[in-house]
């Protein structure tokens, strides 16, 4: 069983702030330094994932990793259920899903910009699996937002999307299933054209989603090509099992 030195999560966050702000581990300046400072100074209690880490400050880190995995999967399952059961029509449900998606983006950015203070992933296979799950969560978050915005104009008899006649629903509005479909197609940058946004505000959100999706793809390819090409997956897992890690985005 992996043993971790006593170093409470909240105390480590304070140490990391000094390291990042004073450039003790690596020299950063300009935009990079600003992003690092914003990430490290974000209050730890702002995201539920950090609540789990703070609540599991104990010698064995195995429990923490299991709980983080369950939490990441639960976010996807809950998001899917809320959207398909029409709960995303409510603004507060959509706001919660957006909040959880921001947490995911924060963790991914931290994995890129704070790698000098966060540990290397315990398992790169696990890290890539969690990244794929995060990708699904982000797509569902955008689907929830599209559903919410469409619901807002339903009473006025309008639609924010142009929908192909073969897909159009009885009430001529975007359904929750179609919102999920449109979000994943947009994230994949395929663009079939059977559903397309006609509202300018939605078009801006679509651009944001495409940019985030491309960032996901770049990070995923960089991880796979960098580790598979050198056979570092097995080596990293073996080394991690023999060392005491600090906290990273994957718990």
Image (cartoon, grey):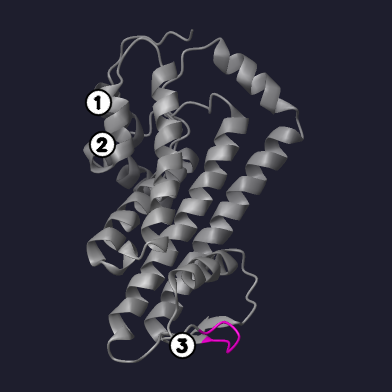
| Residue in the foreground of this view, choosing between 228 and 2 | 2
Q: Secondary structure at mark 2?
A: helix
Q: Residue at x 68, y 40 (%)?
A: 224
Pick whichever of labels 2 and 3 is earlier in the sequence.
2
Is 167 inside the magenta-drawn segment? Answer: yes
User: What residue is shown at x 70% (from left), y 26% (from top)?
Assistant: 232
Q: Which residue is mark 2?
A: 44
Please state which of residues 176 and 207 is positioned toward the viewer in this rendering.
176
User: Residue at left 43%, top 8%?
Assistant: 3
Magenta-highlighted residues: 163-168
Residue contact between numbered discs 3 and 1, judged by CB atoms under 8 Å? no
Q: Is residue 218 left or right of residue 3?
A: right
Q: Are marks 2 and 1 in contact (CB under 8 Å)?
A: yes
Residue 223 rendering spot, x and y as whole percentages = 63, 40
Residue position for label 3: 198
Q: Callout 2 environment at 10 Å: few (<14), some (14 to 19), or many (20+)?
A: some
Dominant SS of magenta comes to loop
Q: Which residue is mark 1?
A: 10
């Amino acid at each position: 069983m992996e043993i971790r030195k006593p170093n409470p999560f909240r105390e480590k966050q304070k140490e990391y702030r000094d390291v990042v702000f004073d450039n003790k581990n690596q020299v950063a300046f300009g935009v990079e330094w600003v992003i690092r400072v914003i990430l490290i100074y974000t209050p730890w209690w702002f995201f539920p994932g950090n609540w789990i880490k703070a609540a599991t400050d104990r010698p064995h880190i195995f429990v923490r990793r299991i709980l983080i995995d369950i939490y990441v999967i639960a976010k996807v399952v809950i998001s899917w259920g809320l959207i398909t059961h029409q709960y995303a029509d409510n603004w507060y449900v959509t706001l919660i899903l957006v909040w959880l998606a921001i947490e995911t983006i924060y963790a991914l950015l931290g994995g890129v910009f704070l790698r000098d203070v966060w540990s290397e992933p315990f398992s790169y296979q696990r890290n890539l699996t969690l990244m794929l799950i995060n990708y699904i969560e982000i797509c569902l978050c955008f689907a929830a937002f599209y559903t919410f915005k469409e619901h807002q104009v339903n009473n006025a008899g309008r639609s924010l999307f142009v929908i192909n006649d073969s897909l159009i629903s009885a009430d001529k509005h975007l359904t929750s299933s179609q919102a999920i479909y449109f979000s994943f197609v947009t994230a994949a940058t395929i663009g079939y054209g059977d559903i397309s946004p006609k509202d300018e505000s939605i078009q801006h959100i679509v651009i944001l989603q495409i940019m985030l999706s491309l960032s996901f793809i770049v990070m995923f390819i960089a991880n796979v090509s960098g580790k598979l090409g050198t056979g570092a997956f097995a080596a990293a897992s073996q080394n991690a099992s023999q060392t005491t890690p600090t906290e990273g985005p994957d718990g």
